[in-house]
Amino acid sequence: MLSFFAKRIALALSQMLAISVIAFSLLYLSADGIARAILGEQATEAQVAAKTVELGLDRPLHVRYFEWLTSALTGDLGRSYFTPQDVIDALLTRLPVTLSLLIATTIVAAIIAFGLGIAAAVYRGWLDRVVQVLSVLGYAIPGFLVALFLVVVFAINLKLLPATGFIPLTTDPAGWLRTMILPIAALSLGAIAATAQQVRGAMIDVLRADYVRTLRSRGLSEREIIFKHVLRNASSTGVTVLGLQFVGLLGGAIVVEQIFALPGLGTVAIQYTSRGDIPVVMGLVLLTALIVATVNLLVDLAVGLLNPKARIS
Amino acid sequence: MSKYTRFLAAAAAGALALSLAACSSGTTPPPTSDTATAPLLTLGQFVEPASFDPATAQEGNAFPYYQAVYDALIKRAPDGSLEPFLATEWTYNDDLTELTLTLRDDVTFTDGTAFDADAAVANIEHFRTAGGPQTNQASAIESVSAPDKTTLVISLTEPDPALEYSLASSLGLMGSPDALGSEDIASTPVGSGPYTLDNAIVGSEYTFVRNDDYWGDALPYDSVKFLLLTDETARINALRSGQINAGIFTVPTSVAELEASNFEVLSQTLDWTGFVYFDRDGVLNPALADPRVREAITISIDKEGLLESVGQGRGELSNQIFPSTALSYNAELDSDSRFDYDPERARELLAEAGYAEGFTLNMPIGPVFPPALYTTVEQNLADVGITMTRTEFGPGQLIPALLGGKHEITYMTLAMFNDWTTIRQYVDADAAWNPFGTTDPALSALIDQFQVAASDDERTEIGQQINKYLVDNSWFGVFSQSLAAYATDGSVDVELQVQQAVPSIYNYTPAN
């Protein structure tokens, strides 16, 4: 088990290093006029030239990369070009917002998706068909459309929930819930759809297996069979898909955060990228890579626990 | 029901009950109508201040953030006229190179420091070296001095007709001199303004509370909150659900939606839209050196069609870059049919100039404008024989490239200013938007005369000649002047601020 994870961690680290090289090159090679963008339209060419030197932008790319890398390893990702914040601060103040959204969405999606998938697989018949249709719909309808619909109905017309804004969980749990219900509902739909289908498919396969027939003939109750034996074997697919969905949610969160004005990483992605705030964008790329790597590790751990066969690879 | 589904139902019911029980109305409380003050004004914005250092204050959308905590030397009334503020009166010397201001003696900053002429000097000198976006407002200043506690003397290297405007803008913002040097001022403003910054969540919201020791007339709202809503849809939803009392809306289609929901939408002309012909000397593209060619390009574009489709009809066709509030503005220029859409005449002009076979024009493309716009322009140009090639830019890259003098032309929407600022920004040889430094002896002479003109009458006369020159020689290909929208929810009365994207913070009162 230990070497399993040691190898996974080493892989994740080398992935992040490669990502940082590629991102750094792409961002800085195509960036002209950073100094001009910072100083604004009214600055003179002389001021722009001075700023370029001050930011070190006249030096070769690989020199700047190694400088960035060495300070990143000590925990200093530099300063934002456009706000007086350190990159780490700019990202860490916003990370909890996005994480609380993503984790809550994943939990909600997991509960509902597993519930629907199990029910569909066990009961079959009309319930199964309904779940399948809902899955296709949930997959096809874009998240932002759902979000806008929810806002119009619940925030504008019924005035039950706020249209925008975020209250931290630590400040006021009830307020956090109120500001999060609509974003979670909008974001979870696609994830539920995909995961429910996977769970249903895996459950049906396992329920057909010989050893299940044997368990039944031994007299175990259906409930015991499903929850003690089948689910454990069927869920590794579901957990893997959920992990993939989490990563996809990172992208969906950008749109949802914009619509609900949540001050999370999604809004950083849009605001700071369109301004060309490269240090923050680099930090964001790295943070996203870290999150994805962590999620993949956790999924591997979960699958490894659920299914001993997976630990060998 | 199975144990599992029962649990799920209970959890869902619990969550719903919790949310509804904890739910307050979530709306901004409407101010009471029979008291002079109201508790809270919530405004929706899409920009936030990069730093609270007054020397880095941006005009336009971000300015109210600074107005809340800092006062300026001069105040611009909603109609653009100048009023006393921290300075009670001011006069120029005879050759307009020295402005002497008399300052108030009863103002204290929130850290206890007194405001006096020495503080003003410290602020202006800090402004000149801080490298903020409005640094050019101080470009003509040679030195500042404080002969006594209530007298400030600004000495100029050359006359600056926009100086008083600048002193009502970023240049004139006064912060406590003790705070100016420190790093803290970026996040903790120390001024003499009607409010103090109570809480700031960067990227989300800024809350200001009343400064009880304010020297001036108290503003009606005890507290002002800015919600940062960068997405236009989020801002509309916030207004519609009662989370903000007022906000700015920049997308043309928003206005129809807001009016349909019975919100009051106030409009004023703010920007001009059209072509900037950077390469008037024909350095990159010899064809553009001929004013007939530039005129042909201008009249080859169906500007009315563009205004209707891209601009949703929110604007007026125009031929000049000066706003109607400027002295140089001349309504007759707008009704000059010479610049009406006329592809036939465009072809004639091109033939006259020796380009009957057409030529190639390179257009820089940015993500701010819809792609359909560039397709229409390309089509219009092709109809008169001009082939448009494209250079694509990503976000934030277009303007630096344009100002760097690498392109012959651009389509752009640009802010309109008072006469002198317009000339300094767009027209004269070292204007930011004149990267090739094109100039002409007749025009330079007019600009010099404007600079030293002693009265508004003189300035009007010369300014209109400058305007006429620019229009006659097709320095720009102006299509329209567009309307900007500001919407309120009816609980607030607001006066728009002339030539400023959003109303000044002084312009809001509770509605009756």
Image: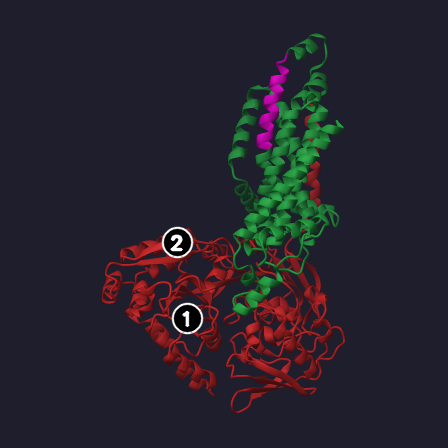
Chain colours: A green, B red
Q: Amino acid at mark 2?
A: Arg
Q: Which of the two marks, 1 or 2, is nearer to us in this view? A: 2
What separation in Å lies between label 1 and label 2 (alpha carbons)? 25 Å
Q: Secondary structure at mark 1?
A: loop
Circle 2 residues within 10 Å: few <14, some 14–19, many ≥20: few
Q: Is residue B417 above or below residue B20?
A: below
| Chain for disc number 1 | B
Number of residue marks: 2
Residue A43 seen in the current view: no
Say whether residue B264 is left or right of residue B84: left
Subunit under mark 2: B
Above or below, B371 relative to B15: below
Q: Is residue B332 left or right of residue A76?
A: left
Q: Quadrant of the C terminus of chain B?
A: bottom right
Residue B235 makes an appearance in the image: yes
Q: Main secondary structure of the magenta part?
A: helix
Label 2, secondary structure: give it. Answer: strand
Q: Which quadrant of the view contains residue A80?
A: bottom right
- What's under tag 1, amino acid-wise? Ile
Q: Quadrant of residue B275?
A: bottom left
| A194 in the magenta segment | yes
- Highlighted range, magenta: A192-209
Which residue is more in the foreground, B173 or A301?
A: A301
- Quadrant in the picture for the N terminus of chain B: top right
Q: Tell me the residue that label 1 is attached to.
A: B321
Residue A200: x and y, percent?
A: 60, 23
Instruction: Say left or right for B240 vs B103.
Output: left
The residue that mark 2 highlights is B390
- Residue B303, given in percent of the width and then of the height, sits at 35, 61
Placement of A39 over or under A64, stated as above or below = below
